Image (cartoon, rainbow, N blue to C red):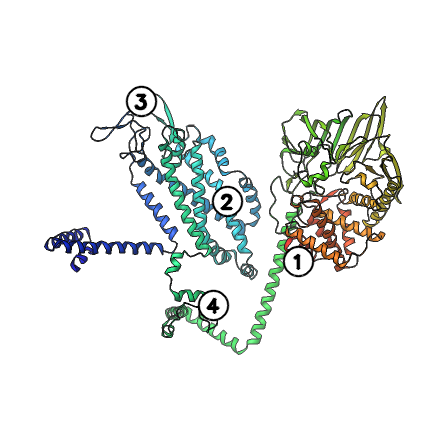
């Protein structure tokens, strides 16, 4: 028996194996049958256990998934490499070697052809095996090029040429939003869709370049983000500040952290390229271009992939999926197998990076290894239950890594002692060490002084470079692209300081019978974007009400019986030429031809406005028509690009620049027409039952106008100290004259207060306060306030609503901001200003401790739901949450700052802010900059703690 086992286990060359089996057969003849069977069973059992041992070894391999998957792909590539392609046949029938009829091509799967044949009677098994090497070669090659180029660009733009980062980011920005397949189709179709006489080599090189460029942004941003995280680490910052070179940072810090993720990136990119090639193949965009091939002896050509790579094969056979589905599914199955294998490799790499050890490997580790990894920090008397203690004698025999390192260093020193240079260096270092030991104080004092000087020098240099970079970034004007991500909320100012007022000239006719406004609008605008523009955008805010709007947040504006309203554009001309345009919701996009930087364009927009019935800024009822934010208004262009934010039922979503208006309105003579221009300058011509109203107003953010039925309205007046006339128009049949008078007086007194508070005179000689619908949200325009009917009731606090409208003559009117993205900029200052007025007038009463606790609980609840002072309008769930954060928390932010800095520095900063940004737009960056200049150098950190969600606890 032992002899048989010995013969079974023989190893060596094929000749020895043959001799062994001959001897085995001889032995089997000499023994009886039972012994032979028993010996053979023992041999089979031994081989089976060896096979299980081999499987166990493979299962416990480190990086098992990657190694096995790579082995499978290499084996598949090798098989493909040595597979010879079959010749194509034009014969209409297929016969085997014996001349027996098999099938007509394309033949379905059978024992002879496991995956069937193609139209040329070639076995699909042979075809897919031949095509594997081209697919794997193309996928891996493109992946290597992507990763190499992405790493190289990321390293160059991060470590050596950071100034180039913005240009690469701007160049790659479109590819973050354009699907890779769409980009590939657009770029490859002109070259590889049809035979154009271009060689297959040139087409292939072009396709590889395109596929590399499509995926390069993803690799670039992956490496860039990873390097950004690495550079934020304290040890990297310390190394940089201590003078480490870029190369040292790369070799010692960046590369060791990136390297473990490259295999993961490699597998991800393989899957991405494989998917992209497959979909391009479906669109008949094959690697190397289409190859015309005669299908039969008849003069008819079909276009195929020139290399028979799998993706192209699947694409060229996709159209035969009904007639011969095996022709399509055969390459797809191999593609799926490759994808599954690579994904399995990717999963193993992800587990290794995350530190997840497979259960099979954990089970194979010894109990002593578990104790080594888990007993850190435990006392010596603590014993893990079920884990055997290590015998003491083994501890004595154990050889630690430090011993091995020490021995290696001794050997290295013995070797280096052969050289004189080393002996001299060693002697000098020894003497220096002895001097340090003998005189430690002067040595360490000198070293500490030098370190501090170097440290201070590095910080000074870093600050100087940072300031210069910030100045350059602030002085530059971005083109229509996504801005770089700010390091925090206030790193960049998006204020457009290149603005030139747009000139609007409108000819409007109001038809009372059907509540329609017909208009011709001439717009003269200058391109101040800093780049040539192919488009210009306008806001059509009334289009928000073209369809019924549901939702509790719109209930306040919708009203009890709403009817739709919209703007129809009939024709648009640009420089007297008809222009193409499109409307998407409230945004009008107009195509521009050669609108160069600094050039002026003349636009003519002919439109019809059907007024809605609701509580919006442009509506009507039985007694009045009020129109605000109703004209097509050019969108603001700043460093964000074009600001195309939608209409919001919360806050003040209208973002505009100052402009000049020349408006003519034709309407029935029964109306009193008023606008936010000075009425003394208005020209009114009556012609029977009709009238024409003409007015000019400059440097306003919007034009507002009302048409009041004279039989329903009456006026109350108040003159301020600086001769600003306040006119309050109300409906005496249902409103209180005493309240209207109180509102006029309250608005006038508010103007007097805030002209001193802001150190800025109101530039309008008139302020018209118009009583509009019953429950309209109050809306303030420069020189005009739309106020709802409930502000003319017996409520004793109605005059404070007028004060709020007066505040917004400065904060929203004179000083603009992006009320959609950064509502806090002016809203919190308006809250602080309003509370300051109420305190000076005796309206404020100290709230009880219980009320303050409830307020803080409400604020904590709102912030827990992801709504903060710095949130844009679309983050707020309802008007109450918005009002609490802007009105209460916004006021608290400035009130606490005023308490901390004293000496009226908050009021000083507010005055500077209003005066500097009159007739301009400001951002959060500008607000904080002014508070820093006003004497609070830590303003940025203070605002951070209030505006950022993690900055404050309650």
Q: Secondary structure at mark 1?
A: loop
The residue pinned by badge 1 equals: 953
Please provide percent x and percent y for residue 763.
Answer: 82, 41
| Numbered disc in front, either 3 or 1 | 1
| Numbered disc in front, either 4 or 3 | 4
Mark 3 closeness class: few <14, some 14–19, many ≥20 residues within 10 Å: few
Q: Which residue is at the front of the view, 161 or 204? A: 204
| Sequence-first tag of 2 and 1 | 2
Q: Secondary structure at mark 3?
A: loop
Seen in the image, is 26 located left or right of residue 126?
Answer: left
Residue 942, by quadrant, is bottom right
The residue pinned by badge 3 equals: 297
Please provide percent x and percent y for residue 610.
Answer: 72, 28
Q: Which residue is at the front of the view, 789 or 780? A: 789
Say if mark 4 contacts mark 3, CB within 8 Å: no
Residue found at x 75% / y 30%? 505
Q: Secondary structure at mark 4?
A: loop
Mark 4 closeness class: few <14, some 14–19, many ≥20 residues within 10 Å: few
Position of residue 811 relative to residue 284, above or below, is below
Residue 186, visible in the rendered structure: yes
The residue pinned by badge 2 equals: 218
Say if mark 4 contacts mark 2, CB within 8 Å: no
| Sequence-first tag of 2 and 3 | 2
Residue found at x 36% / y 36%? 330
What is the number of the mark on residue 376?
Answer: 4
Residue 233, by quadrant, is bottom right
Most distant residue in the bottom direction: 438
Please provide percent x and percent y for residue 171.
Answer: 55, 41
| Sequence-first tag of 4 and 3 | 3
Mark 2 closeness class: few <14, some 14–19, many ≥20 residues within 10 Å: some
Cα–Cα span, label 3 and label 1 = 83 Å
Cα–Cα span, label 4 and label 3 = 80 Å
């Amino acid at each position: 028996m032992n002899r048989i086992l010995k013969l079974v286990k023989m190893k060596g060359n094929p000749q020895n194996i043959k001799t062994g089996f001959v001897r085995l057969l001889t032995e089997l003849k000499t023994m009886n049958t039972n012994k032979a069977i028993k010996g053979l069973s023992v041999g089979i059992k031994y081989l089976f256990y060896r096979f299980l041992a081999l499987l166990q070894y493979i299962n416990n391999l480190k990086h098992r998934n990657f190694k096995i998957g790579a082995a499978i792909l290499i084996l598949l590539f090798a098989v493909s490499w040595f597979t010879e392609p079959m010749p194509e046949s034009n014969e209409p029938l297929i016969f085997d070697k014996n001349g027996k009829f098999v099938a007509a091509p394309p033949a379905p799967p059978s024992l002879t052809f496991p995956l069937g044949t193609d139209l040329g009677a070639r076995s699909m098994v042979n075809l897919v095996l031949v095509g594997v090497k081209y697919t794997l070669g193309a996928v891996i090659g493109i992946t290597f090029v992507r990763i190499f180029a992405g790493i190289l660009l990321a390293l160059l733009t991060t470590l050596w040429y950071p100034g180039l980062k913005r240009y690469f980011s701007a160049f790659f920005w479109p590819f973050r939003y354009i699907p890779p397949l769409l980009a590939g189709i657009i770029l490859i179709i002109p070259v590889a869709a049809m035979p154009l006489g271009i060689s297959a080599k040139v087409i292939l090189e072009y396709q590889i370049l395109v596929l590399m460029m499509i995926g390069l942004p993803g690799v670039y941003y992956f490496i860039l983000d990873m390097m950004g995280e690495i550079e934020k680490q304290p040890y990297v910052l310390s190394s940089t500040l201590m003078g480490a070179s870029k190369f040292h940072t790369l070799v010692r810090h960046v590369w060791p952290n990136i390297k473990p993720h490259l295999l993961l990136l490699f597998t991800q990119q393989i899957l991405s390229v494989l998917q992209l090639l497959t979909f391009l193949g479906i669109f008949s965009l094959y690697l190397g271009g289409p190859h015309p091939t005669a299908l039969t002896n008849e003069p008819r050509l079909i276009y195929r992939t020139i290399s028979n790579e799998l993706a192209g094969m699947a694409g060229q056979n996709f159209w035969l999926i009904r007639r011969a589905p095996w022709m399509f599914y055969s390459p797809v199955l191999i593609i799926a197998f490759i994808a599954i294998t690579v994904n399995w490799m990717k999963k193993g790499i992800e587990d290794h990076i995350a530190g997840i050890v497979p259960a099979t490997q954990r089970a194979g580790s010894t109990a002593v290894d578990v104790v080594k990894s888990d007993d850190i920090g435990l006392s010596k008397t603590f014993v893990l239950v079920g884990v055997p203690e290590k015998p003491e004698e083994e501890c004595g025999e154990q050889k630690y890594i430090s011993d091995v390192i020490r021995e290696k260093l001794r050997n290295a020193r013995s070797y280096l002692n052969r050289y004189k240079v080393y002996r001299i260096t060693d002697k000098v270092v020894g003497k220096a060490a002895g001097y340090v030991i003998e005189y430690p104080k002067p040595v360490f004092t000198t070293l500490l002084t030098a370190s501090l000087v170097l440290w201070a020098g590095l910080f000074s240099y870093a600050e100087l470079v940072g300031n210069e970079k910030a100045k350059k970034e602030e002085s530059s004007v971005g083109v229509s692209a996504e801005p770089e991500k700010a390091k925090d909320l206030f790193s960049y100012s998006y204020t457009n300081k290149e603005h030139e007022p747009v000139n609007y000239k409108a000819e409007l006719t109001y038809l009372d019978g059907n509540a329609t406004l017909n208009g011709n609008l001439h717009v003269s605008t200058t391109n101040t974007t800093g780049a040539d523009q192919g488009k210009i955008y306008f806001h059509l805010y009334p289009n928000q009400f073209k369809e019924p709007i549901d939702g509790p947040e719109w209930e306040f504006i919708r009203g009890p019986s709403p009817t739709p309203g919209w703007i129809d554009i009939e024709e648009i001309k640009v420089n007297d030429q008809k222009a193409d345009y499109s409307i998407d919701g409230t945004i009008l996009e107009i195509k521009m031809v050669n609108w160069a930087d600094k050039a002026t364009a003349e636009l003519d927009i002919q439109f019809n406005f059907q007024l809605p019935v609701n509580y919006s800024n442009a509506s009507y009822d039985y007694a009045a028509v009020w129109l605000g934010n109703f004209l097509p208004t050019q969108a603001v262009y700043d460093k964000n690009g074009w600001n195309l934010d939608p209409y919001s039922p919360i806050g003040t979503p209208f973002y505009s620049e100052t402009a000049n208006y020349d408006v003519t309105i034709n309407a029935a003579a029964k109306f009193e027409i008023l606008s936010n221009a000075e009425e003394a300058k208005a020209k009114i011509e009556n012609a029977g039952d009709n009238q024409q109203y003409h007015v000019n107003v400059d440097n306003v953010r919007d034009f507002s106008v009302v048409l009041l039925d004279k039989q329903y309205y009456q006026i109350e007046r108040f003159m301020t100290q600086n001769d600003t006339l306040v006119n309050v128009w109300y409906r005496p049949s249902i409103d209180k004259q005493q309240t209207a008078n109180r509102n006029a007086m309250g608005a006038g007194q508010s103007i007097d207060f805030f002209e001193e508070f802001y150190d800025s005179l109101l530039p309008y000689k008139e302020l018209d306060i118009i009583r509009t619908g019953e429950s309209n949200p109050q809306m303030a325009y420069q020189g005009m306030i739309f106020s709802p009917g409930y502000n003319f009731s017996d409520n004793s606090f109605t005059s404070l609503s007028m004060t709020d409208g007066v505040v917004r003559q400065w904060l929203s009117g004179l000083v603009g901001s992006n009320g959609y993205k950064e509502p806090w900029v002016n809203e919190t200052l308006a809250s602080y200003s309003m509370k300051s007025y109420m305190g000076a007038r005796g309206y404020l009463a100290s709230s009880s401790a219980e009320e303050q606790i409830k307020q803080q609980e409400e604020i904590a609840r709102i912030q827990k739901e992801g709504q903060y002072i710095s949130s844009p309008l679309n983050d707020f769930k309802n008007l109450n949450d918005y009002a609490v954060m802007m009105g209460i928390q916004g006021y608290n932010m400035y009130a606490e700052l005023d308490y901390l800095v004293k000496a009226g520095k908050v009021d000083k900063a507010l005055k500077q802010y209003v005066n500097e940004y009159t007739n301009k737009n400001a951002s959060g960056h500008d607000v904080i900059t002014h508070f820093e200049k006003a004497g609070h150098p830590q303003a940025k950190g203070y605002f951070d703690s209030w505006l950022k969600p993690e900055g404050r606890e309650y």
